Image (tube, grey):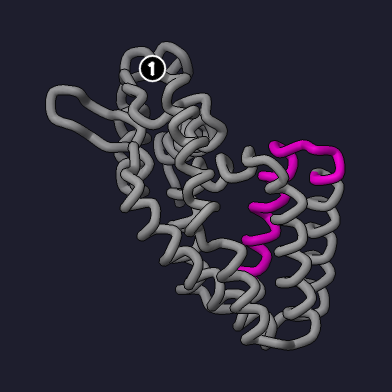
Amino acid sequence: MATASQRLSEQLRETIEEEVATGKLKPGTHLDELELAARFGVSRTPIRETLSLLAGEGLVEIRPRRGAVVAQLSPARLVEMFEVMAELEAMSARLAARRIKDDALAQLEQLHSRCEQAAQAGDPDAYFYANEEFHKAVYRAAQNEYLIEQAFSLQRKLRPYRRLQLRVRNRLPRSLAEHQAVLDAIRANQPEQAAQAMRGHVMVQGDRFADLLVELRSFENTAA
């Protein structure tokens, strides 16, 4: 059973993780323990524990003489991580097409509808959260606990960058169409088509990677 200190650290981790994902805390931002402790009204101990948790996830780096900073990924590292993410998600979609239960399929369809509503409203923030839940539902539908753990772990590290992708012009309707292809293949019990559709949806290469780099530069410049 988690202690009060552990629960507090977990709550703080979720809050800071969300601020990284939403851009409130940008790559390279210094995370001062005293400032964070004052801001959240806690001692430095849970802050230190929280930063350690985030470092373990790869969202924060602990640097000599500088302390904790929000992780700043190189373009090459981003490509590598998205390559792995695409394969994890493709595997999830493949297994989901074989194993999904009726109630899980109904939930996936509801989440797709939420994505559709957000896309039609031109609301990238609402789409981001609905999109996350759609992907998580696919992971769970795969019914492979180890795969779910690995997919969730890498998904957390890539959250800020997946969110940035949604800023690219016309990305929301394209993303929605890609979701539809994944959903159709899962519903039709077509494992390889589901995997292919999901891989293409997640993989960042060519023009999509160039667009992401442009957004990333703009994102980081606002932190300077």
Quick check: 222 left or right of 54?
Answer: right
Magenta span of residues: 119-140
Q: Is residue 4 visible?
A: no
Residue beneath the point at 48% across and 51% down: 209
Residue beneath the point at 32% across and 14% down: 34
Residue beneath the point at 27% across and 37% down: 61
Magenta region includes residue 124: yes
Quick check: 44 left or right of 162?
Answer: left
Q: Is residue 155 visible?
A: yes
> Residue 90, position in %: x, y?
55, 74
> Residue 19, position in %: x, y?
52, 30
Q: Measured along the vertical axis of the image, is residue 33 above or below residue 208?
A: above
Quarter-wise, where is residue 184 in the image?
bottom right
Tell me the residue that label 1 is attached to.
Answer: 224
Residue beneath the point at 13% across and 29% down: 64
- Kind of element beneath mark 1: loop
Locate the C terminus by quadrant: top left
| Most common SS among magenta residues | helix
Quick check: 140 left or right of 157?
Answer: right
Q: Measured along the vertical axis of the image, is residue 137 above or below residue 125?
A: below
> Residue 105, position in %: x, y?
79, 73
Disc 1 residue crowd, few under 14, some 14–19, many 20+, Cα 10 Å? few
The residue sitting at the front extreme is 207
Quick check: 118 left or right of 166?
Answer: right
Amino acid type shown at disc 1? Ala
Magenta region includes residue 218: no
> Residue 211, position in %: x, y?
53, 44
